[in-house]
Image (cartoon, rainbow, N blue to C red):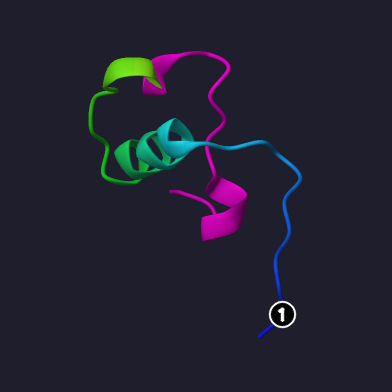
Amino acid sequence: MSDLVDGTACNHYSLLRTMEAAFRLPRLAHACDSIVPIMTRLFGGLN
């Protein structure tokens, strides 16, 4: 297993947005802000 490093600045809203995308849930609070990155690279992408 190799380490994966991503230089994108993420916060708890990034994690929330990633989980919402994975489960196809509506966005909550600041997770819908356009500046919040989704963490697909760290979780192997989302379908």
Q: Which residue is outermost to the front?
A: 11
Q: Which residue is mark 1?
A: 2
Q: Say how many tags the image has.
A: 1
Q: 10 Å neighbourhood of mark 1: few (<14), some, or many (≥20)?
A: few
Q: Where in the figure is residue 11, as x and y percent of width and height? A: 51, 36
**Which of the 4 image quarters holds residue 28?**
top left
Q: Secondary structure at mark 1?
A: loop
Q: Measured along the vertical axis of the image, is residue 41 above or below residue 32? A: below
Q: What span is in magenta?
A: 31-47
The outermost residue toward the bottom is: 1
From the image, give the main secondary structure of the stretch colored magenta.
Answer: loop
Residue 47 picture location, percent across and down: 43, 48
The answer to which of 43 and 8 lies nearer the viewer is 8
Q: Is residue 25 above or below residue 45?
A: above
Q: In percent of the image, x 66 and y 36: which residue is there? A: 9
On the image, the x and y values in percent for residue 27 come to 29, 23
Front-lying residue, 31 or 21: 31
Q: Amino acid at mark 1?
A: Ser
In this rendering, position of residue 32 left or right of residue 27: right
Residue in view at x 43 percent, y 38 percent:
12
Q: Quadrant of the N terminus?
A: bottom right
Q: Is residue 41 left or right of residue 4?
A: left
Task: State left or right for residue 30 relative to residue 37.
Answer: left
